[in-house]
Amino acid sequence: METIYSIRPFLAVSVSGVAALFILFTGEQRRNLREFWTFLASVIKLILVTSLIPDILQGKVIEWTLIELFPGVSLQFRVDGFGLFFATLASCLWIATSTYSIGYMRGLRSRAQTRFFFCFALALHSAIGIAFSGNLLTLFIFYEILTISTFPLVAHKETSEAISGGRKYLAYLLTGAALIIFSMGITYSLTGTLDFKGGGFLKGSGSEDLLLLLFATFILGFGTKAALMPIHEWLPTAMVAPTPVSALLHAVAVVKAGVFSVLRVILFVFGPDLLTQLNLWILMAYFASFTILVSGMLALAQDNLKRRLAFSTINNLAIIILGASLLSPSGITGGIFHIAAHGFMKITLFFVAGAIYVKTHKEKVSELDGIGKTMPITMACFAITSLGIAGIPPMAGFITKWYLCLGSLESKEIIFLGVLLASALLDIAYFVPIIYRSFFKTSPEQIHSGMDEASLWMLIPIGICALGSISLGICPNGFVHLFEIATLVAKTVLGIN
């Protein structure tokens, strides 16, 4: 595999960090200029990230080392197919989320908007840093920058409920960080390196008992941010945050960074051979299956719309991990591609929840009778993407569910096919009642009301992300070759030419 040395990964990571400083110094008095920095940085970041795609598709990797700290460990950016996949998703969705955030924050006349956009930019800075990390240490540094930068976003409203939610958020994620530090120390002592390698690098190092312990601490550490049960409760609690933050948590950065890191451990630290040797893949698959089924059932019981969407996210994150844990070509491909498919679909659903709140201040499913008649475009986007999450064609969710089902057959474990089908039925069970209420029921206050959509700042991102969900289903490679990259990653990890 040819290695190219280029500063572009470092620039792609840095651009939103620089933008964060410009946003901070511009302040509240020049709001339009403040938002201009956000848009400029998001466009530059997308250009830099997508410029890396041709080299990666040719089987090359791109590296840039900042400093070597000690033998075998450096602060290094390394772009491979998996990192580029995550970075491309985050870069695309940042533009939509930034546009939506302006409409949301101004629509509610929210306070401390400069702090909000400053932390938002830092979160994307750290997300791309995670994507392009060449080793566990670099990943951990950006992983914790992401935690710290998103805490003020979770607690943005500064109510007692928001502060409590922010504290729980920090308590869970910093506990996970301690386990990651422990795991990195053991890994370095066993191998003398922390560098990621397709197919893993731990095989032949340490005793079986030690490797079992190491796997458990890694998964618990990174699995906290990925909201695996029973270490998930911070995520529904964090729904007290403004809706753009919820979208950031679920679709662009935080939980996606968690599941990305879990897959890094499974596929690039331990690797398929070692996981098979220790029978860890089957344990991980059952662990993910438990989360899939329980979170789906809990979603059914939620009347708060954002909490229902939160448990749906927990369900879909576990589906991604299940796909990777199957260690089959289709399973890994489907799991990785679901990161993007779920990202586009779930961000649309949270955008809709925010648009409803801005226009009506309603947050509960039981309050949504007839909302589809006053906000038809918004709720049509909700209906399309929610059914897509259930795997209904032609949405992107159908592609991922199809490959995940194939992956379960390739692994010769029919029970996981049953889990995936049950999950799709649960998706339908907790989304269809919302669609029904919206379009087929009428509340007294809406009998004589006409269309009353949210502002274009919010409506356009909703429509674009919904269309993105459809286009990924119809043409999964599109203009950024996401499906091709996912397939390339699966082949690299499994050693398939």
Image: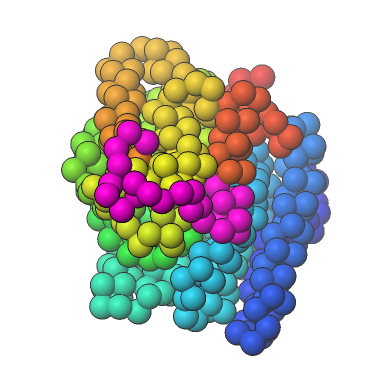
- 386 versus 189 height, above or below: above
Instruction: Name the colouring of the figure.
Output: rainbow
Residue 58 seen by the camera: yes
Count of picture labels: 0
x then y, percent, for residue 148: 45, 71
> Residue 123: which quarter of the image?
bottom right
> Residue 471: which quarter of the image?
top right
Residue under the point 26% across and 78% down: 160
Q: Residue furthest left?
A: 301
Residue under the point 72% across and 70% down: 36
Drawn side of residue 302 relative to residue 73, left or right: left
Residue under the point 72% across and 77% down: 33
x then y, percent, for residue 336: 52, 34
Q: Residue furthest front?
A: 448
Drawn side of residue 33 relative to residue 343, left or right: right
x then y, percent, for residue 343: 51, 43
Viewport quadrant of the C terminus:
top right
Viewport quadrant of the N terminus:
top right
> Is residue 345 magenta-colored?
no
Residue 133 seen by the camera: no
> Is residue 451 magenta-colored?
yes
x then y, percent, for residue 363: 31, 56
Q: Tell me the magenta residue range.
A: 439-462
Please state which of residues 341 and 446 is positioned toward the viewer in this rendering.
446
Residue under the point 56% across and 35% down: 469
Drawn side of residue 27 relative to residue 388, left or right: right
